[in-house]
Image: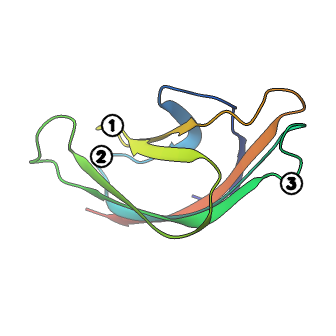
Amino acid sequence: ILQTEVAISNNISSFTDIAGLTFNTGQVRSAVINYSVYRISTANPSGNAESGVLSITYDNSAASGFKWLITAYGISGDSGLTFNITDAGQIQYKSTDISATGYSGTMTFRAKALEQ
């Protein structure tokens, strides 16, 4: 996946898809995702920044709900995001509340995948 930038919403309490960050379970065995997140609001003018790496691995023999393993490492900062991956290979996020007034949030990512 080439470098892509997407909007990140504030105060999301249930996992929400990250557009363009999905992996085909019939083709991809594993992937490494480099990402950077920046969130800012009027109440938090210095912003919340984070960068890191997500590593994912697909195991088609695993039980439903556990087909993908996701590990975060090399994280610097704290953007208030939590990541998840569905059995279908869609990366998702939840976000903390840093105030809706003047809110802006972006995530930039790129990924390299290894085929099955």
Inspect the image, locate mark 2, and give the three-letter code of the amino acid beneath it.
Thr
At 52% from the left and 26% from the top, the residue drawn is 13
Q: Residues within 10 Å of mark 2 (few under 14, many from 20)?
A: some
Q: Is residue 102 left or right of residue 21?
A: right
Task: Label 3: state its secondary structure.
Answer: loop
What colour scheme has been applied to the protein in the rendered image?
rainbow
Task: Label 2: state its secondary structure.
Answer: loop
At 21% from the left and 45% from the top, the residue drawn is 67
At 61% from the left and 46% from the top, the residue drawn is 80
Inspect the image, locate mark 1, and give the three-letter code of the amino acid beneath it.
Ala
The reply to whether the C-beta atoms of the residues labelled 1 and 2 are less than 8 Å apart is yes
Task: Label 1: state its secondary structure.
Answer: loop
Q: Going from the N terminus, do you reach mark 3 or mark 1 first?
A: 3
Distance from Cα at disc 3 to Cα at disc 2: 39 Å
Q: In which quarter of the image is residue 100?
A: top right
Q: Residue 46 carries which label?
A: 3
Of 95 and 64, nearer the camera is 95
Q: Mark 2 points at which residue?
A: 25
Q: Residue 97 in the image: x percent, y percent?
A: 67, 33
The reply to whether the C-beta atoms of the residues labelled 3 and 1 are less than 8 Å apart is no
Of 96 and 35, nearer the camera is 96
At 75% from the left and 46% from the top, the residue drawn is 106
Q: Going from the N terminus, do you reach mark 1 or mark 2 first?
A: 2
Distance from Cα at disc 1 to Cα at disc 2: 6 Å
Whether residue 24 is visible? yes
Q: Name the residue under label 1.
A: 88
